C-alpha cells in the first residue's frame, strides 16, 4: 500500500510539474500554464492540481469495477507510446543536426561519492518494475484470473521497452541536464532546438497518460486498504458510504502529499529502497527460502539467497547515500 500510495503521489507531482513547472536547485522550468497564460494565482501548483483532482481524477476513481477503466487504460497506453514516438523523432532530428549530447558508456567515477551515487539508481529501477500489488485486485475482476499471467508478461516487456526508449532519447536530447522528472526539460527554457508546440505535445501527452493511469493505481490501493481495515465487512463496491469515504480520504492524502513534497526524487529514492525492494526482492526470496510447502529446489534457494543479500546490500547503500546527500546539502 505504501508503494502504491507513493506511486500515485509521484504521478501527481509529475502532473504538477507539467502544468506549473518546477524550480530545482535554481534551474527554473516553466509549466504549460505559465507559458500559455503567464504566472497567475489560479495556475499555481496547488490550484492546478486541485482542479485536476476535482474534475478529472475524482470521476475516474469513483468507478467501482476495474473493467470500467479498460477504455481509459487503453488510451493511457496509446499516449505513452505516442510520447516515446515523439521523443524519438525529436532525438533523431537533433542527431541529424548534430545537436545531441554524447552518451557515456560508463559512469564518471572521478571520486568516491560518484561511485556510491550509482546505487541511487537502483530504487528508481525497482520502483519502475514493482507492480505486484496490482496483480491480485485486478485479477479478481477478470472472468479468468489466469489471464493475468500473459498480461503480466506482456506488460513487463512493454514497460521495459518504453523505459529504455525514454531514457535513451531523453539523454540524447538533454544529456547531464536531464532532470529527475524529464518532462520539465521539454520547456522553452531547456535550450533544445525543438518548437514549443512539440514541447507542449510531449508534456501534455504524458501528463494525460498519468491522469488515466492514476485511477487504476488508486483502485488497487483502495481495495488493499479496505481489506486491511475492514476484513469482515461486505465487498467495498456494495457499500457506498465506505467506498466514497475511502476514495475521498485517499485523494485528499495524495493531494496534500503532492503539494508538500514537490520533487519525485525523494519518493523514488526512499520508497524504492525500502517498500518496493521488499515487495520485489526481499519478500519473494524469503518465501522461497522458507519453503513451507517443500517445493523449492536447491538451485532456487541459492538464487533466492543471492537475491536477498544483493537486495539488502543495495538498499542499505542507497539509503545511506541519500541520507548523506540530504544532510550534506
Image (cartoon, rainbow, N blue to C red):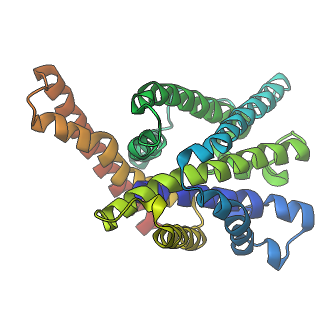
Q: Which residue is more in the foreground, 233 or 101?
A: 233
Where residue 259 appears, as percent x and y from the top left, is 60, 72
Residue in the image at 85% along x and 52% along y: 188
Where residue 24 appears, as percent x and y from the top left, is 65, 62
Which quadrant would residue 286 be assigned to in this image? top left
Residue in the image at 40% along x and 33% along y: 145
232 left or right, relative to 238: left
269 left or right, relative to 214: left
**Farthest-out residue, bottom:** 41
Q: Answer above or below: position of 189 versus 47.
A: above
Q: Answer above or below: position of 230 versus 305.
A: below
Residue in the image at 38% along x and 56% along y: 224
Residue 180 visible, this orientation: no
Which quadrant would residue 2 be assigned to in this image? bottom left
Q: Answer above or below: position of 289 versus 36.
A: above
Where residue 100 appears, as percent x and y from the top left, is 75, 31
Q: Which residue is more in the foreground, 197 or 138?
A: 138
Q: In which quarter of the image is the N terminus?
A: bottom left
Q: Answer above or below: position of 87 versus 34.
A: above
Residue in the image at 47% along x and 37% along y: 142
Residue 36 visible, this orientation: yes
Amino acid at each position: 500500500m505504501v508503494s502504491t500510495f507513493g506511486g500515485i503521489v509521484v504521478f501527481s507531482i509529475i502532473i504538477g510539474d507539467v502544468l506549473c513547472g518546477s524550480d530545482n536547485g535554481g534551474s527554473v522550468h516553466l509549466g504549460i500554464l505559465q507559458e500559455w497564460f503567464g504566472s497567475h494565482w489560479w495556475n499555481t501548483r496547488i490550484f492546478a492540481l486541485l482542479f485536476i483532482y476535482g474534475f478529472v481524477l475524482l470521476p475516474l476513481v469513483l468507478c467501482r469495477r476495474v473493467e470500467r477503466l479498460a477504455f481509459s487504460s487503453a488510451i493511457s497506453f496509446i499516449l505513452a507510446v505516442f510520447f516515446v514516438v515523439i521523443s524519438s523523432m525529436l532525438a533523431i532530428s537533433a542527431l541529424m543536426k548534430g545537436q545531441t549530447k554524447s552518451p557515456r558508456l560508463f559512469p564518471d567515477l572521478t571520486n568516491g561519492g560518484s561511485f556510491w551515487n550509482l546505487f541511487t539508481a537502483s530504487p528508481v529501477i525497482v520502483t519502475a518494475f514493482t507492480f505486484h500489488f496490482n496483480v491480485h485486485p485486478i485479477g479478481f475482476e477478470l472472468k479468468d484470473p489466469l489471464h493475468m499471467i500473459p498480461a503480466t508478461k506482456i506488460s513487463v516487456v512493454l514497460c521495459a521497452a518504453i523505459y529504455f526508449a525514454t531514457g535513451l532519447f531523453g539523454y540524447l536530447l538533454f544529456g547531464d541536464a536531464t532532470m529527475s522528472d524529464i518532462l520539465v526539460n521539454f520547456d522553452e527554457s531547456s535550450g533544445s532546438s525543438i518548437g514549443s508546440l512539440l514541447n507542449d505535445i510531449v508534456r501534455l501527452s504524458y501528463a494525460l497518460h498519468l491522469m488515466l493511469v492514476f485511477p487504476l493505481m488508486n483502485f488497487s490501493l483502495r481495495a488493499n486498504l479496505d481489506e486491511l481495515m475492514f476484513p469482515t465487512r461486505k465487498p467495498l463496491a456494495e457499500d457506498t458510504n465506505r467506498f466514497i469515504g475511502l476514495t475521498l480520504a485517499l485523494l485528499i492524502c495524495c493531494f496534500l502529499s503532492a503539494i508538500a513534497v514537490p520533487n519525485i526524487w525523494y519518493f523514488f529514492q526512499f520508497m524504492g529502497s525500502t517498500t518496493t525492494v521488499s515487495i520485489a526482492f526481499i519478500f519473494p526470496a524469503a518465501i522461497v527460502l522458507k519453503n513451507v510447502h517443500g517445493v523449492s529446489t536447491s538451485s532456487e534457494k541459492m538464487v533466492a539467497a543471492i537475491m536477498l543479500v544483493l537486495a539488502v546490500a543495495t538498499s542499505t547503500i542507497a539509503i545511506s547515500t541519500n541520507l548523506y546527500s540530504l544532510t550534506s546539502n
